[in-house]
Amino acid sequence: MPAFQTARGMRDLLPEEAERLNYIICKARETAQYYGYREVITPVVEPYELLSAKSGEEIRSRMFTFKDLGDRTVALRPEFTASIARLATKALKNEPKPLRIFSVGSVYRYDEPQRGRYREFWQSNFELMGSNRPEADAETILLTNSLIKATGLRNYSFKIGHIGVIREILSQENVDEKAQNAILQLMDKKEYGKAFRLIKQEKCRKTLQGLLELNGNTAFETVEKIKKHVAGYEKAVAAAENLLGILQLVTESGCPIETVEPVFARGLEYYTGLVFEVYVPELDTALGGGGRYDRLIEVFGGEPTPAVGVAHGLDRIALAMQTQTTALSPRRDKRAVVIPVKQELKAEALKISQMLREAGVSVEFEVMGRKMAKALEDADRRKVDFAVIVGEKELKEGAVVVRDMMKHEQTTIEIGRLTEKIRGKDE
Amino acid sequence: MPAFQTARGMRDLLPEEAERLNYIICKARETAQYYGYREVITPVVEPYELLSAKSGEEIRSRMFTFKDLGDRTVALRPEFTASIARLATKALKNEPKPLRIFSVGSVYRYDEPQRGRYREFWQSNFELMGSNRPEADAETILLTNSLIKATGLRNYSFKIGHIGVIREILSQENVDEKAQNAILQLMDKKEYGKAFRLIKQEKCRKTLQGLLELNGNTAFETVEKIKKHVAGYEKAVAAAENLLGILQLVTESGCPIETVEPVFARGLEYYTGLVFEVYVPELDTALGGGGRYDRLIEVFGGEPTPAVGVAHGLDRIALAMQTQTTALSPRRDKRAVVIPVKQELKAEALKISQMLREAGVSVEFEVMGRKMAKALEDADRRKVDFAVIVGEKELKEGAVVVRDMMKHEQTTIEIGRLTEKIRGKDE
């Protein structure tokens, strides 16, 4: 018989890893709640046209695409935004704006597997639709800050930029959107030489080349320099001012920004304004990133709706936590094993297990029919807190024996006081 | 531009539906904890061979199967058990037995969509590996009882049976496993006539036909009748005794069983012993079901390992809760909107929002730049508990105005006492 493997690029999360991922999902969900985002659950399998409508060639070519049994072309979602855009244009069309929507789940991209990169990975996704104001942009950075902080990660930092600065320069020089996307995609891959070669207009190219070299001592200084550098490109100046406004709001709200990158393009074609990413020093890849995409909802057939969003790479956050050896929640609930002294007492012992479970204790019932010594040895290995030993003599007096596995102490206790005894150790 | 739809058989869960599903997932995870099951997360995309190894023709033909870009045949998991069996034979091979494993997530089957049945649906899955004893079987029923009870559903009932009774009769008459599977599959579809026609041996056929008509006044009586009816088929009698032992344990542990079905086959080929399902009167389809499959781990290349497991259909549980209009958790956390009186106060207002969020209050910040009256009107529509109004005059005195949206009362309050004011209403 074959030794079955996972499919290439896929992986099993064992209990410890699954616990870490669930912990992060829980923090993301809490963040959504604190910021007033309502959760929706969208399908993993989506029509190909929906997912490919605006995601950029790069992602399009790396989707898991196939035909279903009804011969329709579908694909596994490579991200959440297209699905949320569908909701915004249909089911949630008449909801009052702003509309704040949260999602969390697995997404799929056919990438070469490497450390921290899998073909199935997990994202939390926040979309704020209906506001074109800097406080909306600021909110996506602030909630990202809250989430990363809640995971216990240290030394993380934000990198921000503004696609509008670049797009507006190119637009003023009559570079069409398709060419803009090609240029931005090269910039995203840091292939600046290739990108600049696509720009025929010399003034425009020089301005962008100059932007690339700009650098200030602080984030504020960098933005001021950008503003000066693009003078003459009126709308690019406005974009820089917009970036400054966002920067001020997040800084004053307790989230310092370290880096402003004057030429900052992110992988997805749909960004139109702010773009940002968050990093830890231990990893090369971003833990999360997002930005503004004011024309996306239109593409999906909705009313023109300004929008800003962010996605967090939960596997990378997990990897960063591992690398920084960040501990999870401070304490665990108590665990017990329940062992009947002989087979005839199984039903009684099970009843006691049910009582403990209903009181919130985690109980592993002895289902192997082992002798007491063996069962206790196993309980020791499993590092449970208590063993509850159900014996005939004690049972006649309405009692059981409780063994504290850490202290190696054993006492007889009334069944009515058992829950208190076990849970009392919580305090 | 096209109005994008979900793919056929897929659906979006809007906030209220997503909340219900998450609530059930949360109850399943709590149940796992109370019963000592550790959670693992396995991929949605699995090798076709793994998923098809033992799942039965019925499910095999309804899988979402496709080739990945590396030309390997993969499929979307139609259930969890095969993935967990892989873990048991590889990554968790050396873990001490019993091994208790929990999973929850979406699974995929290409069925005709209908009420309560989708092509993407949600399951929680519990597997207990390493014990062949009735207390292990009993545990899967008891934890299902705990889960369904925790969701608040009423009038649910269990149906149990034992594949061993049927398989052992057929085995003793030298019907091979393949033919047994064909017969059981027909029985599962209640096509008894067709099933019996496949049995050439008259005595055997008559015994099984007789089984079908057995009925007792209580579950115990039915099992006793089965035992008598199959006398002469020694191992079938042992199977009936095993069922009786399980029935006794669960009944004494506070989970009454209403129905014993003498001829009870479930859709998956791998069952060998106990099978059970749980129902509510409002729905035709089971909310969950499981059973014993003592030979499955071997099929996946592991050591022979007795095992028993159960899967719960979370969408059906959600549908049952809707049908019974079961309320979710009794209370919600407090929600507030924070509105700056003028644009210049945005940063201050954001700071106050952050303070409230860090104290666990859900805050929707005013990102639309609306006038106060409009913003308050919107807050009213969103049914938040409080509006926090940040004005210049109050701010100078370290205070803000808080409006209780339910009572229509407005007071000025020190910022230091704001959290207490808002959270205090919890009590």
Image (cartoon, coloured by chain):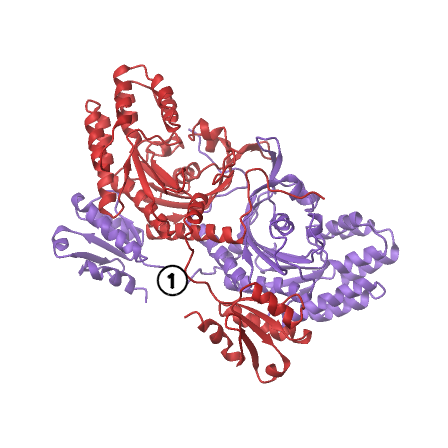
Chain colours: A red, B purple
Quarter of the image where one finds residue A89: top left
Camera-side residue: A295 or B97?
B97
Residue at the limit of the structure toward the bottom, as seen here: A397
Horizontal and vertical percent for residue A306? 31, 36
Residue at numbered disc 1 = B331
Residue B368 found in image quarter: top left
Q: In this rendering, would B31 be left or right of B274? A: left
Residue B290 relative to residue B221: left or right: left
Can you say which quadrant of the picture contains the C terminus of chain A?
bottom left
Towards the viewer: B110 or A134: A134
Residue A222 locus on image (x, y percent) = 23, 33
Q: Secondary structure at mark 1?
A: loop
Tell which subunit mark 1 falls on: B
Q: Is residue A193 above or below residue A148?
A: above
Kindly identify the amino acid type of the residue bearing the numbered disc 1: Arg
Residue B405 position in % (x across, y down): 26, 57
Question: Residue at 77% across / 68% down in the picture?
Answer: B225
Q: Nearer the viewer, residue B39 or B237?
A: B39
Question: Where the N terminus of chain A falls, by quadrant?
Answer: top right
Where is A66 relative to B347, above or below? Answer: above
Could one spot residue A313 in this view of the protein?
Answer: yes
Residue B100, quarter of picture: bottom right
Name the residue nearer the viewer: B216 or A51.
Answer: A51
Q: Residues within 10 Å of mark 1 (few under 14, many from 20)?
A: few
Above/below status of B59 relative to A296 = below
Where is residue B257? Give x, y as percent.
64, 67
Camera sees residue B384: no
